Image (cartoon, helix red, strand yellow):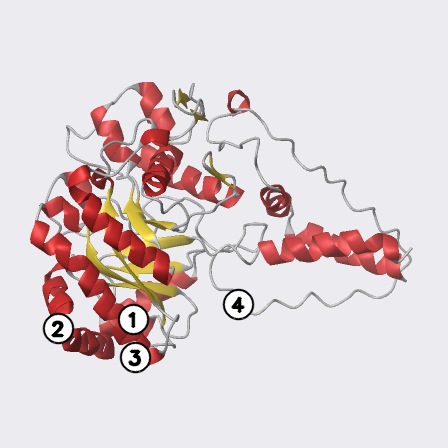
Amino acid sequence: MAASVYPLILLFFSCLHLSKSQPFIGVNYGLVADNLPPPSASVKLLQSTTIQKVRLYGSDPGVIKALANTGIEIVIGASNGDVPGLASDPGFARTWVETNVVPYYPASKIILIAVGNEVTTFGDINLMSQLLPAMKNVQNALEAALGGGKIKVTTVHVMSVLAGSDPPSTAIFKPEHADILKGLLEFNSETGSPFAINPYPFFAYQDDPRPDTLAYCLFQANPGRVDANSNIKYMNMFDAQVDAVHSALSSMGFKDVEIMVAETGWPYKGDSNEAGATIENARAYNKNLIAHLKSMAGTPLMPGKVIDTYLFALYDENLKPGKGSERAFGLFKPDLTMTYDIGLTRTTNNQTSLAPQSPTPRLPPAAAPTRQIIPAPPQMILPSPVSPSDKNSGQTDVHNSTPRSASLAHICHSLSISTMMLFVSTLYALII
């Protein structure tokens, strides 16, 4: 009898592990505003959500200090203006690390430094050529100060670094960036740091504002789009954009370099000529994106691969220049209320927590012993892969090559806390 319960025990603890080990949702915390709450209030807000990672565009000491001892992972940034100094002077890189990292680490869980942001968009070849030596000097400074392998270094790219993303399977980097990117990718590969990219289906929709394109961008029911080269049908724009990056990496011989989505989001309002910038679409995009990531389905070219993804953004930044949408990506308002609800708030039901876990709550006191019949555990059937044509609105694409880990995750996400407790009771009864 006891041996027969081992598979159930294994399943239970696998589910328990998966429910606490999905650290792939982050948020961008920009500071180009004059109305933001203090860092301490923002950190309390983050701790009330399932967000587990934060990306800063700089290295604000107040924010980094406030994040200390929370377990929230932090990406900090060296500005584009710092790149020339970091590239030309190893001493400047050491000073930068000793000022912005050493005083806070490891209490503040800094995991990555992004040297420069979207540098290729400025067309400054000299600045682009300085990225690699800047990254190397920062990496050397980190290793000298902290030892190797603790904090990684990368830079963040915009999608226009690709020559094209459609079809995804044939995407390559722009030839004029090839030499610079080859050096950066060699660095990523050697150090294990990610290739960070900013895919925005919203901007792709601006160029093709048809109803079926909107549904495709929002992970909603749509006919799908077939990659004529690979014959893969894509059911959402996010997967297509990420796979385009993967194809470009593969074309240069770096298919094993990890991809990180440093920014993605959807504005809840914009100028009159910004199609689709509504609160309904913003909610749909972010909520369905999170569901897609939590499904652990991956993308067609990377099935079962979960990409670390940083939502843009924690707050609106009211001093940012540009179109109206630039100031309307915030998930939360300065008064700490939600702009719209995408299910990020911690709850006590079966929502999977993506944030650092608080101590496991104690089970309620046992009732006085009574004679009762313990119901059998619910029957669980691994879901069969479904074709894109079987999708309903808002559901994510599940590929035929979905691995067992994704199927197990699907089961675990469907289990409520009460079901978990029922497992424990049932296992106890079977063993005794």
Query: Of circles 1 and 4, which is in front?
Result: 1
Which residue lies under the disc numbered 3? 144
- Check if mark 1's residue and mark 3's residue have beta carbons within 8 Å: no
Measure the C-alpha gap from mark 1 to mark 3.
21 Å
Q: Which residue is mark 4?
A: 358
Q: Earlier in the sequence, mark 1 or mark 3?
A: 1
Q: Where residue 139 sits: x, y (%)?
A: 28, 69
Q: Could you say whether the residue bearing mark 4 is in a helix, strand or loop? A: loop
Amino acid type, label 1: Ile
- Mark linked to residue 64: 1
Q: Which numbered disc, 1 or 2, marks the residue that appears first in the sequence?
A: 1
Callout 1 touching callout 4 (CB < 8 Å): no
User: Which quadrant: the N terminus?
Assistant: bottom right
Give the label, 1 or 2, closer to the camera. 2
* Residue 282 on image: x %, y %: 32, 37
The answer to whether marks 1 and 2 mark residues whose Cβ atoms lie closer than 8 Å is: no
Q: Quadrant of the C terminus?
A: bottom right
- Image coordinates of residue 319 in percent, x first then y, are 12, 53
